[in-house]
Image (tube, rainbow, N blue to C red):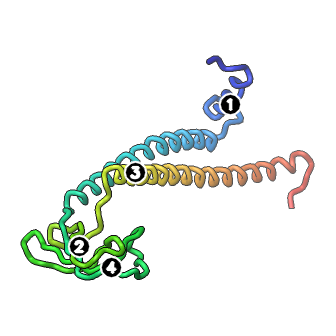
Amino acid sequence: MAMTPSRCEEFRTRLWRWRRSPLRRTSDVVEAWLLLAAWTLGVLGGAAAGTVAAAAADRGFEEDRSARRQVVAVLLGRVREAAPTHADVGDNAGATVRWTTPDGRPRTGRAAVPAHTPEGTRVPVWITSRGDLVPRPPDRSDALLRSSLIGAGAAMAVGGTVWGSARAVRALLDRRRMRQWALEWERADPRWGGRTA
């Protein structure tokens, strides 16, 4: 796709800091390099951080899935129609269940089971290798979605940090240029017949 004359002129205008010019200041060159470095680091660093964070989260979810196992527990009482606790999901309610640990010891604890389940019903629960009750681990698609969100968050955090830092440095450069501009006007004003205060 060929560039139109107006686009070509706009492109040249944006690159003025890179061209030799008697009006170009050192701070203009510093700003040009700063912007190039910020874009490069923001894009590449953000992509790398996102990839690493997503891979680490995926490994964590995989280890979490492999460290938990599903066993069958027996419901020790009828599940009441009590208000579900913050840990209960959907139509589930907290109830006392008994299960056997991997080393053969019986344990009891509270688990989320479907509401209105009668006493003595066998319900699936998730435990650790030590036999402690834990929530169900995320399935593969849920873990993939969570890993992707973590990776996207890390990429945005790195990109935002780099861009914010570049904006702060740019603000400092602008402040420095304004001070230089004011000093140059003070020096030029008496030569043009004005008076400084």
The amino acid type, in three-letter code, at marker 2 is Thr
Say which residue label 3 marks: 145
Mark 4 and mark 1 lie on one chain; the one further toward the N terminus is 1
| Horizontal relation, residue 38 to residue 73: left or right | right
Q: Residue 193: which numbered mark, if any?
A: none
Displayed quadrant of residue 17:
top right
- Cα separation, mark 4 vs mark 1, equals 81 Å
Residue at x 9%, y 77% (from the top left corner): 105
> Secondary structure beneath disc 4?
loop
> Secondary structure beneath disc 2?
loop
Q: Nearer the viewer, mark 3 or mark 4?
A: 4
Say which residue label 1 marks: 21
- Cα separation, mark 3 vs mark 1, equals 52 Å
Q: Residue furthest right?
A: 193
> Secondary structure beneath disc 3?
helix
Q: Quadrant of the C terminus?
A: bottom right
Mark 3 and mark 1 lie on one chain; the one further toward the N terminus is 1
The amino acid type, in three-letter code, at marker 3 is Leu
The amino acid type, in three-letter code, at marker 4 is Val
Q: Are marks 3 and 2 in contact (CB under 8 Å)?
A: no
Say which residue label 2 marks: 121
Q: Residue furthest top?
A: 2
- Cα separation, mark 4 vs mark 2, equals 10 Å
- Cα separation, mark 2 vs mark 1, equals 84 Å
Vertical arrangement, residue 75 with respect to residue 161, above or below: below
- Cα separation, mark 3 vs mark 4, equals 33 Å
Mark 2 and mark 1 lie on one chain; the one further toward the N terminus is 1
Say which residue label 4 marks: 79
